[in-house]
Amino acid sequence: MLPLKKVARENLATRAYGQLREALMQGQLKPGQRLKINELAVMLGVSDTPIREAVMQLLREQALEFTSSQSFQVPKASFRRYAEIREIRLRLEPLAAEKAAALIAPDAVAVLEQAHSALVAAEARGDWRDAVYQNYVFHLGVCHAAEMPSLTTILESLWLQSGPTLNLLYPHALPHYAGEHQHVRLIRSLRERDAAAAGNAIRADLEEGGAALMDLLKAIEEGRVTAPDLLEAAERPA
């Protein structure tokens, strides 16, 4: 069962869209996962119509794909698709970090530090769902701190398309760093108001921390492993 809440009767399509959008960005949905309009309507406590309207919007944003008139799916993991999104993120997230360095408030830095600590703790206990979520909180926190609404909209769109794929990070493509975690470098740079260092840290996080995921997606593309098998293995108790 998805962790979705019932929505109020006003603005039903907008609220349903918001819940599904968050679930995709936060990695609550998996690559290739099939969903049915009537099942989502029951979960959210609305009729089929608001769900269908929300789904149509997400289809336009390339966050979902049609499988039939009553069902749809999260796009399957794709090396080429993710590589394109990653390349754009490599250009735009450093810009967000650089802008955030000049503007971010101390309490916002503390929130980032808490998210990173929660990420490390989730990885240590093997709570992969929470690890994916805390990584989302960290990166989008940096993005919002930049106070650039247009940039935020673009980056949220990229996370909307790539959030489900990040489930493959755990435990099959765990982020590794030659030195200290790049999140720690970024937090320090933000505290010191060092824009260049902040941009370099988040760029290195995407390159270094995501290298194993890129290798795994390449293996999936070449047929050496399959995403469904990996996701199923990740759900099994250790």
Image: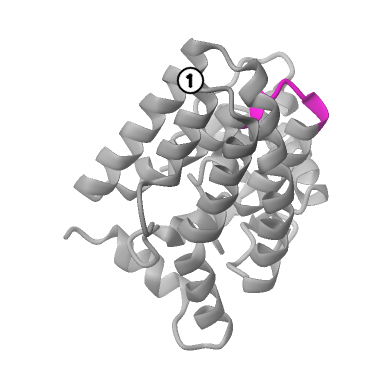
Q: Quadrant of residue 87?
A: bottom right
User: What range is drawn magenta here?
Assistant: 143-150
Quarter of the image holding residue 71? bottom right
Residue 92 in which image quadrant: top right
Tell me the quarter of the image containing the N terminus. top left
Q: Is residue 7 above or below residue 78?
A: above
| Farthest residue, direction left | 238
**Residue sitting nearer the eye, 43 or 119:** 119
Task: Kindly identify the residue that appears in the image at 59 percent across and 33 percent down.
Answer: 140
Q: Quick one: SS at disc 1?
A: helix
Between 173 and 182, the one lying in front of the other is 182
Question: Is 106 situated left or right of 92 in this image?
Answer: left
Q: Is residue 20 visible?
A: no
The residue labelled by disc 1 is 109
Q: Main secondary structure of the magenta part?
A: helix
Task: Indicate the quadrant containing the C terminus: top left, top right, bottom left or bottom right.
Answer: bottom left
Q: Residue at x 58, y 36 (%)?
A: 198
Measuring 67% from the left and 42% from the top, which residue is drawn there?
93
Going by the numbered disc 1, the residue's amino acid type is Val
List x then y, in percent, for residue 191.
Answer: 49, 21
Give the vertical position of 186 relative to 223 (above or below): above
